[in-house]
Image (tube, grey):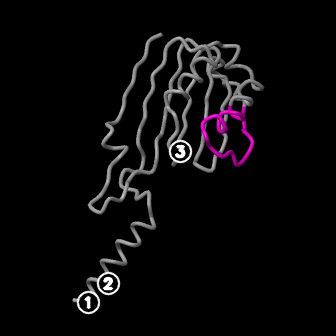
Amino acid sequence: MSLTEEKTSDKQTSKRGKFGVKFGFGPHLTLDGYECDSRKLDDMNFLYGLLDTLPGMIGMTKIMPPYILYYDGKDKPEDRGFSGVVIIAESHISIHTYPEKRFLTFDIYSCKSFDIERTVEYVVKAFGIGNFSKRVHHRGREFPKDMDMVENIMDSDRAKTSEQ
């Protein structure tokens, strides 16, 4: 199995500001799978089951059942396949399949950390992926994770300013 990986530095995942406030909204995993099992890419029940169980497996909170649509490819039958999404409290998990091309795109965007390596391993095994490209982008790098701490710092700064 071949792997292409683009990763952001650990500094981005643990960035802290001047007062110790941790910044960063959360990880966005994208996975492009090649040489997949075309039968699984073409099986709506399989896709539904995967999207239905994956949130619980990675510690996320599913807030709706998966929603899957079929696209017939119109004048390009090789583009036919399924698109599916499950909305989680932490954001979303989505997939797009192309059975004729034995290709899929898969992503998880979350405001909560999750075991990215375990998730990739699971998806690769589930779809029999022969080759893949994985990217992890850390979203909202300037987003303060702990709003209570930010408010306390701001209140403290305001109090100091008003005393002067």
Give the residue pinned by disc 1.
163
Q: Nearer the viewer, residue 3 or 77?
A: 3
**For the magenta stretch, what is the residue range?**
51-69
Residue that badge 2 annotates: 159
Q: Which residue is mark 3?
A: 110
- Residue drawn where x is 67% and y is 34% of the image: 84
Q: CA distance from mark 2 to mark 1?
A: 6 Å
Kindly identify the residue that appears in the image at 71 percent across and 27 percent down.
47
Residue type for callout 2: Ala
Does 153 appear above or below 40?
below
- Decide if residue 82 is on the left or right side of residue 112: right
Residue located at (61% from left, 41% from top): 59
Q: Is residue 7 above or below residue 21?
A: above
* Occupied quadrant, residue 80: top right
Whether pointer 2 and pointer 1 mark residues with C-beta atoms closer than 8 Å, the reply is yes
Secondary-structure class at tag 2: helix
**CA gap, disc 3 to disc 1?**
41 Å
User: Hey, what amino acid is under mark 3?
Assistant: Ser
Question: Which of the two marks, 3 or 1, is nearer to us in this view?
Answer: 1
Question: Does the segment drawn in magenta span residue 82?
Answer: no
Q: Is residue 19 above or below residue 4?
A: below
Closest to the observer, 83 or 13? 13
Name above or below for residue 161 compared with residue 141.
below
Please tell me which residue lies in front, 80 or 112.
Answer: 112
Residue 39 position in % (x across, y down) = 70, 13
The quarter of the picture where the C terminus appears is bottom left
Check if mark 3's residue and mark 2's residue have beta carbons within 8 Å: no
| Residue at figure coordinates x 59%, y 23% from the top left | 122
Would residue 9 appear left or right of 129 to someone viewing this image?
Answer: left
- Whether residue 145 sits left or right of residue 73 in the image: it is left
Lower position in the chain sequence, tag 3 or tag 2: 3
Residue furthest out toward the bottom: 163
